[in-house]
Amino acid sequence: MFKKKYLCTFISVSLLFTTVNVVYAAPSYVDKKENEIQKNNKKIKDLENRNKEIPKIQDDLKEELNSLQVKLEEKEQQLEDTKSKINHYENEIAKIEEDISSISKDIKETEDIINKKIEEIKKREEEEKEKEEILGQRLRGMYINNPTDAILKAILDSGDFGDLISRVNNISRMIKLDKELIEEVRSMKENLENERKGLEEEKVNLDKKMISLSVNKEKVKSTQKELLTEKDNGQSIISDLNNIEKDKKSTINKLDKEKSSNEQDVSKLVEFNDKARSQIDNFIKNQINNKPADKTPQNDKEQGNSSGFIRPVDGTITNGFGERIHPITGVKGMHHGVDIAVGRGTPIKAAQGGTVITATYNDIYGNMIILSHGNGVQTVYAHADSLNVSAGQQVKQGQVIAKVGSTGMSTGPHLHFEVRINGSVVNPMSYI
């Protein structure tokens, strides 16, 4: 992961270069390196912010995936239920078709039986007609020939009384048999007719049952068709959900690769900045070590505490020297000085007599002053509300050089105070 502490280091080095540049002409490569460092730091910050966003995006995607998985399982269960219903209706249709086939067979058999009964009825009607015709002819003959004479003739022609009785009984039996035969034929015809009617009623019932089964079959088919449509829709939805799930997983993997790529880019940028800072530091140290001797009166240098420094303002130390999390950038890095909290407009005094190297505005340090005290010793005063001195001016220890403010990258009124030896920062608390 990108080493955030380099950002604060860059800020101080950049600041020092800017201030020195006021007095000394820097070569063009220093300006170029400075611009590249600034651009790289912006890229580093952007990449770091992006890498901070990526886990949140991935967490959101994973949460969406969990929700999507629940929906997918629900839809798959619905699809299974639909398949089960379709199978049920397929079985229903098969059963109905089997019943229809059976009833069709029954109807056909009933129609065949009815046709047979009709043929039998016709035969019985013909028999009845023949018997009635024979009996009618006999009766008509007897009527024409006078049945009394026929009976008398039969009696007279009889040989004895026994023969007479026999002849009379035969005549009576014949007539009786003819009548019974006619009645039998008529009864058989009536029975056949009743059977035929019963079969026709049975056929009507079978036809009704057939119609009912056909209607039910169409309903079942309609329901099955709806279920098949529902099944197709369900499969389509499952396919869409799977594609969404695939895309989200792919995005998560891409974000992992992007994060890894960002870290590699940050590492390269940091490596470049380290080299650039080293070049700038070497230039600054050379300029400080090679500048003209300090003309500050000796008695001015000897005032103050044992180190020769006084506190530029009286206030509470809110941020000490060393590593810290920057209150604005949120980046962990080196704090090159101490922050002393005091009210806006509080006079800022020179910690020791010296020469004003620069008195200008910096985007990071705001209104700031750098004093050179000779022998490679410098002090820095940042975030001032206003400046009371200008570059090249000689100041005495305790002289008011600025007023406390909150300019540049600042969270509130305070003085940022640094001590540098030959361009390198040291802990100011060792001097004040």
Image (cartoon, rainbow, N blue to C red):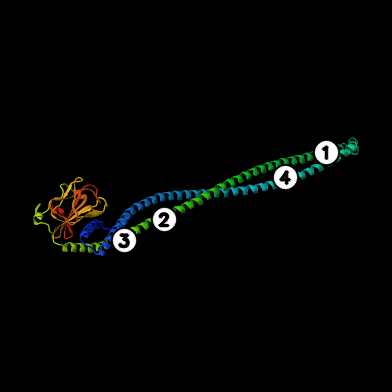
Question: Could you tell me the amino acid type at mark 2?
Answer: Asp
N-term mark: 1 or 2:
1
CA gap, disc 2 to disc 3? Answer: 26 Å
- Mark in front: 2 vs 4: 2
State the residue in front, 343 or 132: 343
Q: Which of marks 4 and 3 is nearer the N terminus?
A: 4
Q: Label 2 crowding class (10 Å Cα cut-off): few <14, some 14-19, many 20+? A: few
Disc 1 designates what residue?
A: 175
Residue 247 disc label: 2
Kind of residue at badge 4: Lys
Which labelled disc corresponds to residue 265? 3
To which quarter of the image does residue 322 belong?
Answer: bottom left
- Find numbered disc 2 in the image and state the secondary structure of the residue it sits on: helix
Q: Which residue sits at x=31%, y=61%?
A: 265
The percent coordinates of residue 74 (x first, y second) are 44, 48
The residue under the point 37% across, 55% down is 252
Alpha carbons under labels 4 and 1: distance apart: 30 Å
